[in-house]
Amino acid sequence: MSNPGNTLSQVARGLKAAISNPNNSEEAKERAQERLRDMEESGELESREAHEDNVAIGHKANLSNPNTSEEAKKHSAQVLEEMGRS
């Protein structure tokens, strides 16, 4: 049986991805931002979980950023591996 916290975390990650996706319309980004805000305000996302998700998202973005040094990419890959999110 799946953990509801993991499901909420996955929803939050999807919403964050939708917000940052340049191919999404502004309307879609706004809806995603509103839903994410609602989840945070309602307490659906625990603050620790939300923080860990933000850290992982930042490191994943770092890996695909062409302006990031190889050293920084290695560090991000290591952090993600330690978090179990590689």
Image (spheres, helix red, strand yellow):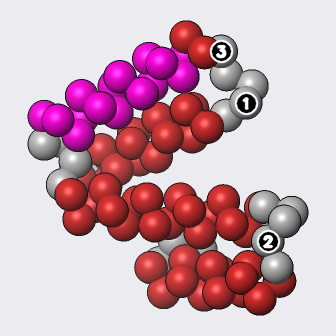
**Side of 1 relative to 71 (left or right):** left
Element under disc 3: loop
* Residue 74 appears in view: yes
Marks 2 and 1 sit apart, C-alpha to C-alpha, by 20 Å
What residue did someone put label 1 on?
Answer: 22
- Callout 3–callout 2 Cβ contact below 8 Å: no
Which of the labelled discs sits on residue 68, or is there none?
2
Please tell me whether residue 56 is drawn above or below residue 30 in the rendered image: below
Q: Quadrant of the N terminus?
A: bottom left
Which of the labelled discs sits on residue 25, or is there none?
3
Magenta-highlighted residues: 28-42
Element under disc 2: loop
| Circle 2 residues within 10 Å: few <14, some 14–19, many ≥20 | few
**Residue 53, position as x, y percentages in the image:** 40, 60
Nearest to the eye among marks 2 and 1: give it: 2
Element under disc 1: loop
Query: Three-letter amino acid code at disc 3?
Result: Ser
Marks 1 and 3 sit apart, C-alpha to C-alpha, by 8 Å
Query: Three-letter amino acid code at disc 1?
Result: Pro
The residue positioned 63% from the left and 79% from the top of the image is: 76
Residue 22 covered by magenta stretch: no
Q: Main secondary structure of the magenta part?
A: helix
